[in-house]
């Protein structure tokens, strides 16, 4: 017997049933066995599935029509007495997943859950009939069923559906995690989000709230006259931010493309074209590390406002966050990891970049303006600081180390060095700084904004400097974009633009410590 035959023999599974349908399940069972993932519970479910098929009961039919959602049914009958319910002839047709079950011989109670909520159901042999009840007894926790019946209250007062029929709609071949423990391993929760959503009420609530946040964000922008647009996700030049891009290839055109790191340069082309207020809720991609704040694929909203300044955007941002927080959390004071965060407009602090290095970071000007001292300090703190980096970049790293973690309440940090702001408008009084701000809350950046650079000559010089930095080994430096420069040469109105990290905003408003908690399917290492 060769090695292949030995492996095949090892994967052979004995079910203990002579059902003609047993062979249908063998490929699945053998794949479990190959991964050492087979257990007696799964085999038991397969045997019962064979019994159901033998009895002529389909495992995956599509002929049941759901008439009601559970939550509205519960709400409509809240407070209704048992006597009133008994007089009511109303019937409901519900569908959902069995999430718990208790059997008492000829009767059984089970809880049915759909996307809106859950309700108790009562199945009795005398109501269903012998044959239908015998079929029902083959169902398992995790199965999706359709229920038709009337409502009553048990002796404990719980609203319950008295089942006239229970139909199997989708068979669950794998058992759900144990009721009281659920999924505890974080990686399993993220990798098997479909199970996490079944057994973790908080996970379902986070993503419901995320949907609400995005909806209210969009409503806020539209109510203020911003036009929602769409721009390319595959771009011939990676631009709009300083980040390392993902590279792909278009076969038909035989050209290299990049997944966008930001939609900025395309949105500003629309300002040239005459649109004065535009926004895009977009997916962007940056080929960077993964941690509690970063996922290589993320969502942000970028918006641009002609004839406005970065200071106008500060005011708008305070109103935006207050609007979204009130819609999602009921008010402008939210709790994040045990700390109260006040998002009430007018309470947000505004501080210049270099002022923050002194007041919050504790560094004097003669220190943070000394290249050698700052470089040595950063290296001593265990961070990378190459000789090719400008003083502005080192000062930004100094800020990341000693200022950013301390910005718990909302802070606008503005007037960043020009050297680290290649797309920002220079400040009129001091060309070494730009009219740019970043928003920090809970020690992390949530937004980046600036008055836009619309001088094509100045922009060309900034691009050329970025090209030199790229040639010196900076993989995150911007590339030269001649088409964007051509657009500026037609004339772009003075404007301000901003990007807001949607994932981080959702983290804040759902009290989630990791970005993976608020992304349905975060990027993970390949499963071993």
Image: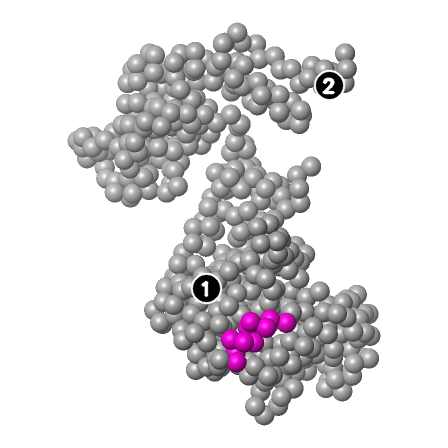
Residue 404: x %, y % from top left: 64, 71
Q: Residues within 10 Å of mark 1 (few under 14, many from 20)?
A: many
Q: How far apart are the two marked residues, 1 and 2, measured between alpha carbons?
A: 54 Å
Which sits in the foreground, 236 or 13?
Answer: 236
What residue lies at 28% left-to-right and 27% top-to-bottom?
148
**Residue 28 placed where, x, y %?**
57, 23
Report the residue at 39% width, 41% height from top. 115
| Residue 452 at least partly seen | no
Quarter of image, res 132: top left
Q: Secondary structure at mark 1?
A: strand
Is residue 217 found left or right of 244 in the rendered image? left
For label 2, the SS is helix
Magenta residue check for 487? yes
Q: Is residue 249 above or below residue 476?
A: above
Residue at image coords 78%, 83%: 370
* Residue identified by numbered label 2: 4
Residue toward you, 464 or 374: 464
Q: Quadrant of residue 406?
A: bottom right
Q: Earlier in the sequence, mark 1 or mark 2?
A: 2
Residue 436's mark?
none
Q: Main secondary structure of the magenta part?
A: helix
Quarter the N terminus occupies:
top right
Residues rendered magenta in the picture = 480-489
- Left or right for 98, reference 5: left
Q: Classify 10 Å Cα crowding around label 2: few (below 14), some (14-19), many (20 and above).
A: few
Classify residue 420 as left or right of residue 472. Answer: left
Residue 218 can be seen in this image: yes
Q: Residue furthest top?
A: 18
Q: Position of residue 478 (x, y in %)?
A: 65, 70
How was the colour assigned to the protein in this rendering? Answer: one colour
Instruction: Name the residue beneath numbered marker 1.
Output: 280
All told, the count of numbered labels is 2
């Amino acid at each position: 017997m060769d090695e292949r035959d030995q492996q095949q023999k090892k994967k052979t599974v004995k079910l203990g049933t002579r059902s003609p349908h047993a062979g249908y399940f063998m490929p699945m069972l053998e794949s479990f066995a190959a991964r050492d993932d087979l257990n007696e519970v799964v085999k038991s479910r397969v045997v019962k599935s064979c019994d159901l098929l033998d009895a002529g009961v389909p495992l995956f039919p599509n002929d049941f029509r759901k008439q009601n959602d559970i939550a509205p049914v519960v709400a409509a009958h809240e407070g209704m007495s048992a006597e009133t319910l008994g007089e009511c002839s109303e019937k409901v047709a519900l569908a959902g997943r069995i999430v718990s079950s208790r059997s008492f011989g000829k009767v059984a109670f089970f809880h049915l859950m759909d996307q809106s909520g859950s309700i108790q159901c009562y199945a009795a042999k005398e109501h269903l009939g012998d044959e239908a009840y015998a079929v029902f007894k083959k169902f398992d926790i995790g199965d999706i069923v359709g229920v038709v019946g009337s409502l009553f209250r048990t002796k404990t007062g719980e609203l319950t559906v008295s089942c006239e029929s229970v139909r199997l709609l989708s068979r669950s071949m794998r058992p759900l995690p144990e009721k009281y423990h659920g999924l505890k391993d974080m990686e399993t929760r993220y990798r098997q989000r479909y199970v996490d959503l079944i057994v973790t009420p908080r996970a379902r609530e986070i993503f419901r709230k995320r949907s609400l946040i995005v909806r209210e964000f969009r409503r806020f922008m539209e109510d203020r006259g911003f036009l929602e647009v769409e721009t390319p996700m595959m771009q011939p030049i990676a631009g709009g931010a300083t980040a390392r891009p993902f590279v792909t290839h278009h076969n038909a055109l035989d050209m290299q493309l990049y997944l966008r790191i930001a939609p900025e340069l395309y949105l500003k082309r629309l300002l040239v074209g005459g649109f004065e207020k535009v926004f895009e809720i977009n997916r962007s991609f940056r080929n960077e590390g993964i941690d509690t704040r970063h996922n290589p694929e993320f969502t942000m909203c970028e918006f641009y406002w002609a004839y406005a300044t970065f200071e106008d955007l500060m005011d708008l941002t305070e109103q935006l966050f207050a609007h979204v927080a009130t819609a999602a959390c009921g008010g402008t004071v939210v709790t994040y990891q045990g700390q109260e965060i006040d998002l009430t407009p007018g309470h947000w602090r505004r501080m210049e970049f270099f002022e923050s290095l002194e007041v919050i970071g504790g560094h004097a000007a003669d220190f943070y303006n000394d290249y050698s001292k700052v470089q040595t300090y950063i290296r001593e703190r265990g961070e990378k600081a190459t000789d090719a980096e400008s003083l502005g970049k080192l000062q930004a790293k100094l800020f990341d180390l000693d200022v950013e973690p301390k910005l718990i309440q909302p802070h606008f940090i503005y007037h960043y060095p020009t050297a680290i702001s290649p797309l920002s408008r220079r400040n009129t009084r001091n060309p070494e700084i730009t009219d740019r701000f970043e928003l920090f809350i809970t020690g992390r950046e949530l937004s980046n904004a600036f008055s836009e650079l619309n001088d094509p000559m100045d922009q060309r010089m900034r691009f050329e400097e970025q090209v030199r930095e790229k040639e010196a080994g900076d993989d995150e430096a911007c590339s030269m974009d001649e088409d964007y420069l051509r657009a500026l040469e037609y004339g772009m109105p003075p404007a301000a633009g901003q990007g807001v990290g949607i994932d981080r905003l959702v983290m804040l408003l759902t009290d989630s410590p990791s970005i993976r908690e608020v992304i349905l399917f975060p990027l993970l290492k390949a499963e071993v």
